[in-house]
Every structure is written in structure tokens, then in C-alpha cells.
Image (tube, rainbow, N blue to C red):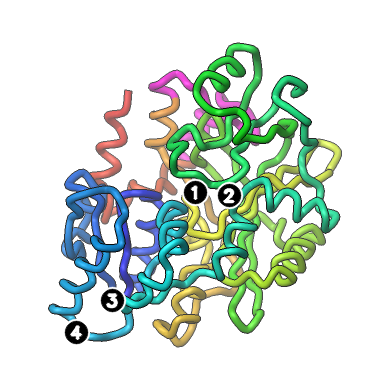
Amino acid sequence: MIIIFSGYNDRAVLAFIRTLEARGVDYLVFARDDKDLLLKTPYKNRVFLVRESRDLEVDHIASFMRRVKERYGERRYLLAPSTEALNRFVQQHRAEIESLGLTVPLVEPDTYALISDKKSFSDVCKAHGIDVPYEYVSLDEADFPFVAKPRTYDTSLGKSGRPWIITCEKDKLEFSSAVDSRRFYYQEYVEGKSVYLLFYISKKGDVHRFSQENVAQQAGGKSIIAAVTSSYHRSSEAERYEALLLSLGFTGLIMVEVRVSSDGRAYMIEANPRFWGPSQLFVDAGMNFFELFLKEYGYLDQASFGKPRNARYFWLGGLLESLGRREGVMMHEGTLDSFLQDMDQWLVHDIYKRKDSMEIFKGGLQCR
């Protein structure tokens, strides 16, 4: 049985649950609170409990699992690696979590942190001949535009722990007043095509890969709004990342963000060894990494991962949220005007404009 903590990374969790439902894999959900979006879907009947606290505590998880076992007995329970906060917490308390009867499907903690921490993975890539954006010695020496990135994952930074895209003195002052700049490092902002390289590496070393090209993104490098399937995973650049990940002993799900400049040079931006937001794209494309994950852990005999179909990903709620807050939209392909003119072609692919999530879709239309 799969155990899912929901309420964060909602779109990825929904795509995962759609896969579980389609393949008949049993699961239970621990909802974040009574505002959890899954409670607006038919999958609310799989919500085993609504958490009284959003804080992650081993004692809370132990209590949850005792209640699960009282109802379902001793069996295999697999934790879905749905968010960075959850994964880091579980890694920190891995022995205790596993003693509760939960399988943790993550590579060992040091390797996970090496790849997930932005500075360390940037250094590793550079050492292996993979280009990364130019790094400035200090905040004072950085030229606009540049990106401030947290050196390591740190929950104490909260939302301020995200990368900051800094384009002017006003942005720089806002950043400096919000965080301890010593906990960040500074890279040149690279203009160009935005690509996600997607991998699943099994414990036996089998590698499956796919890719997407991002079309539109929320301002400040936040969530992807629109994307299409890509062939970038067939490139020699993708082979270099595959070789690197294998050399590091990485296994599991991972997304590597790559920026390709106008001169064709590719730069590693960051890596996320967990579920990623626009996962519905690979599900719709017939390249289902979730099924590879489920097969590895014995929940499926076969995985649907073959010849890809052209597919699109779209999140109207994210677009309306950005426009409503007047934050703007980052266009990686074309202009915002042309994108909006083609809205009818995108809308049919919306993550929430589907029978099982229409209530969420309607809620997104209320963004201002």
C-alpha cells in the first residue's frame, strides 16, 4: 500500500494518484488540513486522516501508522517521495521512519543532499565538465540580471529559501532585507530555452529518460504553467547527465533543469530528486515514470513506458494567479500575447479541467 502526504506539490500528487487509480494500486492519503485540494476530488474517500498539524514529527507519523495497521494490518507500506520537505525530513529520521514499517524509496542521505543542494550539485557538474552559469564571488560583484540561490536546503528560510531572480537594485535591496545573503550564492541569469531532463534510474542501473520543453512559467522561476514534450533526452547532453548520475550512485526519480542559450550552449540550473509539478505531462505522453517507480517496488508487473505521444501540460490557475497578482509570466517560447491567443489549444490539456478535478478547476478561475 502506498502512503501519500498530500497538500503540497498538489499537481504532481494528483498525477500520481491518477496513475494509482488507473493501475489499481492501493493507497492511503494523509491530508495536510481541511483545505487540502484532494478533498475536492473523488479521491477524498482515500483520505485516511486529516492532519491536525502541518509540522512533520516522527511521533505524529508513528501515530498515523499505528492507526493504519490497526485497520489494514501488517503489510508493505511505501512512502511516496512527493515533496522536498518530506524527503529531507524522512532522510533526517530515516531509521525511525523505517522502523514504523514504511519503506523509504530514496537514495542514501549524503547522495540525495549532494544532488538536491544547489551549490554542491553545481560544483559536481562543473567538475565533470558540465556547464553551469557563471558564478560571482559575492553579491556586491554580481551583474544584473543574476540569480541568488540557497547553498543548501534549509527549512528555516521558509519561502525565502527559493532562488531569487534579481534584475535591478530594487530586487537586490528586497533580497538583502529578506534573507542572510551569506547563505546564498550568485550565478549569472541565463536566457534561453528551458528544458527539464527526466530520469528514472533503477537499483539495477537501468535508465529511462524523457524530456519536456517549458513554454511559460510563473514569475521569479516559480511553477511551470505550460510545457510540451521534447526530444532533448535523446541528445548527447542528456547522456552526460546519465553518466554523471550513475557515477554518483543515484537511483530513483529525478528532474534536471537545463537552460539552452541562443548559441546552443547548455547550462545545468538545478536538480530535483523527487516528484515534480508538471508530472501529468509524462503521464499523458505515455512515458509514465510513476509506473517505473511502482514496478521497482513490486506494485506493478509492467510499466507503461514506450514510444512517446506528443502531449502538452497546462495550468490555467497558475496563469491566472500570476496575472491577478500582476507578477507577470516568464515566457520561454514566444510572447505572452501569442500564448494567450492560442489559449483554446492549451485549455484542453489543463491539469485540473478534468472530470475528477473540476471543483479545483473552478476554484482556480476565482483567482484575482
Front residue of 300/122: it is 122
Q: Which residue is mark 1?
A: 313
Image spot of residue 2 (x, y percent): 33, 73
Query: Of the residues under marks 1 and 4, which one precedes in the sequence?
Result: 4
Identify the secondary structure beneath mark 3.
loop
Does residue 31 appear in the picture of this structure?
yes
Q: Amino acid at mark 2?
A: Val
Dot placed on the residue nearer the N-terminal end, 4 or 2? 4
Labels 4 and 2 touching (C-beta < 8 A):
no
**Is there any visible trace of residue 25 in the rendered image?**
no
Q: Which residues are magenta?
A: 323-345
Return the residue nearer the eye: 340 or 198: 198
> Is tag 2's residue or tag 1's residue first in the polypeptide sequence?
2
**Residue at (55%, 65%) from the top-left corner?**
109
Tell me the amino acid under the disc marked 1: Tyr
**Distance between the Cα atoms at labels 3 and 2?**
30 Å
Question: Which label's residue is closer to the chain start, 3 or 1?
Answer: 3
- Residue marked by disc 4: 73
Query: Which quadrant of the rendered structure holds the N terminus?
Result: bottom left
Q: CA distance from mark 1 to mark 4?
A: 39 Å
**Residue type, label 4:** Gly
Residue identified by numbered label 3? 26
